[in-house]
Image: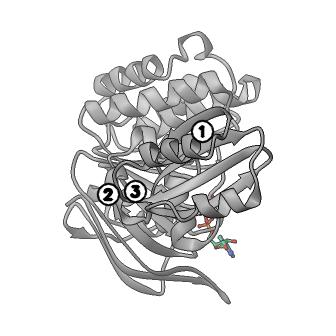
Amino acid sequence: MVVKVKNLVKRYKEIIALDHFNMEVDEGEVLGLLGPNGCGKTTAINCILSLLSFDKGEIEVFGKKMSPDAYDIKRQIGLVPQEVSVFGNLTVRENIDYFCGLYIYDKNLRRRFVDEAIEFVDLKDYVKFYPKKLSGGLKRRLNIACGIVHKPKLIFLDEPTVAVDAQSRNFILNGIKQLNEEGSTIIYTTHYLEEAEMLCKRIIIMDNGKDLVSGTKEELKAMITTSEKIIVSFSEIRDETVSEMKKLPHVIDIEKDGDDYMIKFENGFNNLTNLLEFIKEKELTYTKLHSQLPTLNDVFLELTGKELRD
Ligand SMILES: Nc1ncnc2c1ncn2[C@@H]1O[C@H](COP(=O)(O)OP(=O)(O)OP(=O)(O)O)[C@@H](O)[C@H]1O
């Protein structure tokens, strides 16, 4: 196990930012830490990295107790912080070189690693630029290069795609996949559901400083009652007919949104067949019909009663 966090408690005066938070990360995985703004993701990362002290709990990284001066462990870790954290008075290359120099002392190796990081984030054309001349997306890429240039085995990325354009976002997400394929274990915090779905092998859903559940996407979705939603648009339907439809096998609930009816089913077979038979029997006409499998938002909604908006 690469990271093990047990019963972590962190308070900021009266605010409990982490409330007995637990997390385990296996070597080679991309773990998604998914939760709404303010749920404690950044605090958890900062505690794990010993950048913040905490009130209670245990943290082990690479099987050793983490501490502020555990440089042998820190050398193997890369952090891409949420806020772009680079030096305004250094150029792109000088920034990357500075961060590399914190861990890599051999001059030739350092030069090679800096070149490779520049290549990796595709900032070759900007090496002499100062950060203030870079667009938001390019600044984020520089931030990533600074965090990964020393080729760490474990990489924390804290919401690296917030406020970036779609092109840079895809670039960043593909880069993360590549880092993982090259052997790095990744811990990725986000409140974007589709990023967690796309990137992460396993996900921990957080809320109010707690780890609510963890598992693969499939495991998380299997935990909730709603297993399928069928959305049908009726041009005309009576309230009594909707009430009858609610009595079909496995129907949990029906929500109306304009002409659209979202029919939620629990686990069960033949949901669509039953619905189509009902439509035929009642001689209803519909303009569209599609089925949706549960999303991570459904999981979050069922666990917390709140939407985790994308
Ligand atoms: N330095 C601080 N002083 C006081 N409260 C803080 C401090 N840092 C964070 N908090 C509070 O602790 C809680 C957790 O914040 P944290 O930044 O860890 O959440 P997050 O999930 O990373 O959110 P975001 O995605 O918005 O960064 C929030 O209620 C936040 O307001």
- Asked if the beta carbon under badge 3 is closer than 8 A to the nearest atom of ligand 1, the reply is no
Closer to us: 196 or 14: 196
Q: What residue sits 70% from the left and 38% below the top?
A: 163
Its colouring scheme is one colour
Disc 3 + disc 2, Cβ < 8 Å: yes
User: Which amino acid is tagged 2?
Assistant: Glu
- Residue at the far top in the pictured view: 125
User: Which tag is nearer the camera, tag 1 or tag 2?
Assistant: 2
Disc 1 + disc 3, Cβ < 8 Å: no
Quarter of the rendering occupied by the N terminus = bottom left
Query: In this rendering, does residue 168 appear at all?
Result: yes
Quadrant of the rendered structure where residue 285 is? Answer: top right
Quadrant of the rendered structure where residue 61 is? Answer: bottom left
For residue 124, above or below residue 216:
above
User: What residue is shown with label 3?
Assistant: 221
Distance of label 1 from label 3 (alpha carbons):
25 Å
- Asked if the beta carbon under badge 1 is closer than 8 A to the nearest atom of ligand 1, the reply is no
Question: Where residue 105 sits: x, y (%)?
Answer: 32, 37
User: Which amino acid is tagged 3?
Assistant: Lys
User: What residue is shown with label 1?
Assistant: 161
Q: What residue sits 67% from the left and 58% below the top?
A: 242
User: Which tag is nearer the camera, tag 1 or tag 3?
Assistant: 3
Q: Residues within 10 Å of mark 3 (few under 14, many from 20)?
A: many
For residue 178, above or below residue 278:
above
Would residue 274 appear left or right of 214 to someone viewing this image? Answer: right
User: Which amino acid is tagged 1?
Assistant: Thr
- At numbered mark 1, what does the secondary structure look like: helix, strand or loop? loop
